[in-house]
Image (tube, rainbow, N blue to C red):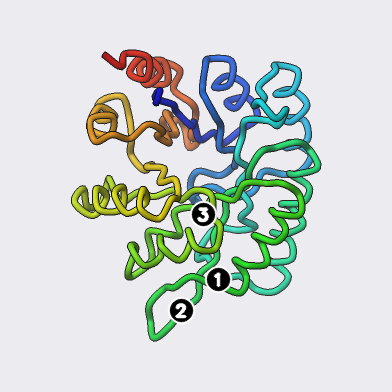
């Protein structure tokens, strides 16, 4: 299977640059300092229009971008109005033609973070209704038992899990990679992946990676076009 790269972008401008440079897929959000939150709807609509103009679409005619549905920074335990906003935002993203959303809901049990099964089920129902793929984001990394969490997400029909375990504990990441095959769910590594270490992931058998490919500049996080070019080169040099 050929290697592919998802580029996480934090502005409309960087999204267009990454798409035109050859990214295989985008993750669209804003505010790097908060770990990525939902892009304003007016900007998302403009981005959808421009990506369609650039023919950045998949075989089903959907935009090759995953839209962050996260109403605020901080933890992943939402009030009712925040959760309602999240679901409405997902519906808006679907109506604009995006192929997937990325989100995550947790709750605390005896001081530990666990999956919020009830709310996750509701979001998955929204995705099924609107033919959206659902990606569980790095809230996954907060789970006490990531293997069990991965199994539960797979059983619920989650398409993909974004995780930074490769940056945190390589042995656990390899375990999760193997379990993902068994559970028939896609595991997407992210978190600190750059051109100087992406080879470790390719060598481990990963075929799709997630990277922001950027740098901080005067308080803003911007796409680094040279870094993106180097990542894309690593993707293309499979032999």
Tag 2, which secondary structure?
A: strand
Q: Which residue is mark 3?
A: 136
79 in relation to 197, above or below:
below
Is residue 88 or residue 155 the one in the foreground?
Answer: 155
Sequence-wise first label, 1 or 2: 1
User: Residue 143: percent from the left, percent from the top?
Assistant: 38, 67
Q: Which mark is residue 77?
A: 1
Q: Which mark is residue 108?
A: 2
Sequence-wise first label, 1 or 3: 1
Tag 3, which secondary structure?
A: strand
Residue at the location (41% across, 43% down)? 188
Count of labels shown?
3
Sequence-wise first label, 3 or 2: 2
Is residue 105 or residue 173 the one in the foreground?
Answer: 173
Task: Please tell me whether mark 1 or mark 3 is closer to you in this view.
Answer: 3
Q: CA distance from mark 1 to mark 2?
A: 8 Å
Q: How many neighbours does mark 3 have within 10 angstroms: few (below 14), some (14-19), or many (20 or more)?
A: many
| Left or right placement of residue 155 versus residue 180 in this view | right
User: Residue 116: percent from the left, percent from the top?
Assistant: 54, 72
Quarter of the image that includes the C terminus: top left
């Amino acid at each position: 299977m050929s290697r592919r790269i998802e580029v996480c972008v934090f502005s409309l401008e960087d999204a267009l640059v990454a798409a035109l440079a050859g990214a295989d897929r985008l993750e669209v959000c804003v505010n790097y300092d908060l770990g990525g939150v939902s892009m304003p709807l007016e900007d998302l609509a403009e981005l959808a229009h421009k990506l369609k103009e650039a023919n950045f679409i998949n075989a089903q005619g959907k935009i090759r971008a995953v839209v962050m549905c996260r109403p605020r920074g901080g933890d992943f335990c939402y009030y009712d109005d925040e959760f309602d906003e999240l679901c409405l935002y997902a519906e808006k993203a679907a109506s604009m033609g995006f192929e997937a959303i990325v989100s995550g809901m947790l709750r605390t049990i005896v001081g530990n973070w666990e999956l919020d099964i009830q709310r996750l089920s509701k979001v998955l129902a929204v995705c099924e209704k609107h033919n959206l793929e659902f990606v569980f984001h790095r809230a996954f990394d907060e789970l006490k038992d990531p293997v069990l969490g991965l199994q539960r997400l797979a059983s619920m029909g989650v398409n993909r899990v974004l995780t930074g375990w490769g940056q945190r504990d390589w042995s656990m990441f390899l375990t999760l990679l193997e379990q993902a095959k068994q559970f028939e769910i896609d595991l997407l590594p992210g978190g600190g992946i750059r051109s100087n270490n992406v080879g470790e992931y390719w060598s481990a058998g990963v075929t799709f990676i997630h990277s922001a490919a950027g740098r901080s500049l005067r308080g803003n996080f911007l796409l680094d076009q040279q870094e993106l070019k180097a990542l894309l080169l690593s993707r293309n040099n499979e032999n």
